[in-house]
Image (spheres, grey):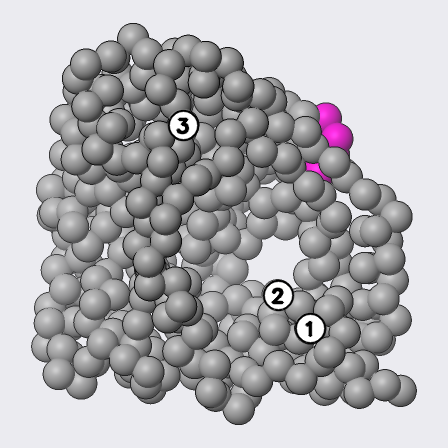
């Protein structure tokens, strides 16, 4: 037995222990209760960890030299690490996920940028070159190709199953909807145009931006139809961009031997529109989301943009179920506007992770305010600490924040 297999088998054995914990089934019920709007209590997750800062942790140090095994090793080490140090309401999957070999090509224009601070290994800055100057550039946009390599998929699966399948089941995973498979027109356009130019164009050439929005919407709709027809969608989706995805309301009772879009979450967002008016979001994004989200069973809208005062326009999106409420939003106003109609994906302030011991009072106050708002308005919610760019090099900050959050939530 080679060294890579020995390493994976040891990790798989520990993963199997974590997956066998009965708490996983209890948490799955909590996830469903939140998403189906009869919450037992809010669930808490920690996602988007600054792994670059934790690289010196012995438990996270990669040892496999085989590239296939290295990817699986990294996944297992990170999942086990969070389970042991910042578990919160995490669910440990009862299998080793192996992604199908799927390539989705570009839309014809690739980002051209100047990057600064990338050497830090964490968050860094970008300066984008404008590649969407006129209709000639718009004509360069094309539908991406979806390429599925069945032989490569089975090679990956067989290799993983042979290594650890007798310890931990191996499961092929299709494409999960979320950030990558969502209608995020303006997050994409800002990288092809630059933020300053985009804001100028919204005022100076709104018709041109509508043509851009139309093109990206059409591309997205056809792409989702294609992955559905090719049978590449994943039915067993645990999270939708860091928030719980499990639901009994999502195509409940239907045969999932062939996964269709109505079995899946749709996702929409327009983060750069945090800096434009509500009317502009409705005109340039929501109008297109209405069309694009129709086929999905449920829809999650938003990311880092504050949306507390825009629930009325978001409600126009068909099958809307969950809305992102960020640290920069007014959680009281959001809960009042959402009521029991929608699920709040509430995001605490990740800046507190820099110094948890010094910020404990502020962390508790922030969480208590959100919990009180949800209780007062009858709003189901999940609490997802994400976008953690730094823990000041101290992984104990993750553990400390998790302890505080769970104490507050369990007092619900």
70 or 191: nearer the viewer? 191
Q: Is residue 223 left or right of residue 408?
A: right
Neighbour class for label 1 at 10 Å: few (<14), some, many (≥20)? Answer: some
Stretch in magenta: 229-233
107 or 382: nearer the viewer? 107
Q: Badge 1 is on which residue?
A: 70
Residue 405 drawn above or below residue 153: below
Residue 38: give x, y in percent of width and height: 36, 48
Q: Secondary structure at mark 3?
A: loop
Q: Badge 3 is on which residue?
A: 131
Quarter of the image for residue 252 reads top right
Alpha carbon of mark 3 to alpha carbon of mark 1: how far? 37 Å
Q: Residue at x 54, y 83 (%)?
A: 60
Of callouts 3 and 1, the N-terminal one: 1
Alpha carbon of mark 2 to alpha carbon of mark 3: how far? 42 Å
Q: Residue at x 71, y 80 (%)?
A: 64
Residue 288: give x, y in percent of width and height: 38, 18
Quarter of the image for residue 135 reads top left
Q: Badge 2 is on which residue?
A: 93
The answer to whether residue 103 of the structure is visible from this angle is yes
Residue 257 drawn above or below residue 132: below
Q: Secondary structure at mark 1?
A: helix
| Circles 2 and 3: CB atoms closer than 8 Å | no
Characterize the magenta stretch by its predominant secondary structure: loop
Of callouts 2 and 3, the N-terminal one: 2
């Amino acid at each position: 037995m080679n060294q890579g297999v020995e390493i994976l088998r040891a990790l798989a054995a520990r993963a199997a222990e974590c997956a066998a914990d009965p708490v996983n089934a209890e948490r799955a019920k909590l996830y469903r209760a939140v998403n189906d709007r009869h919450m037992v209590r809010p669930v808490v997750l920690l996602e988007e960890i600054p792994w670059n800062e934790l690289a010196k942790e012995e438990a996270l140090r990669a040892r496999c030299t085989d590239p296939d095994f290295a990817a699986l090793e990294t996944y297992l080490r990170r999942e086990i690490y969070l389970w042991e140090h910042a578990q919160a309401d995490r669910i440990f999957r009862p299998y080793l996920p192996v992604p199908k070999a799927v390539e989705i090509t570009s839309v014809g224009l690739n980002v051209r940028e100047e990057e600064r601070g990338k050497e830090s290994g964490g968050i860094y800055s970008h300066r984008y070159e404008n590649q969407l100057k006129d209709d000639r550039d718009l004509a360069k946009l094309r539908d991406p190709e979806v390429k599925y390599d069945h032989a490569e998929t089975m090679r990956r699966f067989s290799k993983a199953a042979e290594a650890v399948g007798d310890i931990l089941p191996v499961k092929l995973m299709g494409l999960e909807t979320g950030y990558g498979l969502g209608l995020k027109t303006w997050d994409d356009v800002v990288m092809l145009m630059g933020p300053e130019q985009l804001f100028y164009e919204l005022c100076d050439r709104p018709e041109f931006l509508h043509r851009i929005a139309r093109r990206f919407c059409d591309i997205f709709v056809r792409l989702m139809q294609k992955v559905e027809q090719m049978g590449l969608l994943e039915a067993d989706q645990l999270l939708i961009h860091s928030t719980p995805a499990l639901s009994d309301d999502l195509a409940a009772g239907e045969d999932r031997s062939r996964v269709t879009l109505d079995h899946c979450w749709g996702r929409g967002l327009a983060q750069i529109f945090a800096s434009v008016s509500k009317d502009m979001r409705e005109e340039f994004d929501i109008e297109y989301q209405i069309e694009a989200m129709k086929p999905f069973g449920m829809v999650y809208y938003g990311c880092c943009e504050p949306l507390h005062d825009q629930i009325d326009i978001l409600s126009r999106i068909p099958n809307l179920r969950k809305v992102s409420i960020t640290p920069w939003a007014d959680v009281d106003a959001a809960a009042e506007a959402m009521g029991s109609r929608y699920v709040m994906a509430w995001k605490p302030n990740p800046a507190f992770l820099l110094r948890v011991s010094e910020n404990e009072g502020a962390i508790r106050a922030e969480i208590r305010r959100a919990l009180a708002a949800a209780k007062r308005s009858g709003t189901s919610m999940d609490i997802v600490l994400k976008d953690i760019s730094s823990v000041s090099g101290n992984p104990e900050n993750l553990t400390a924040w998790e302890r505080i959050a769970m104490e507050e939530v369990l007092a619900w």
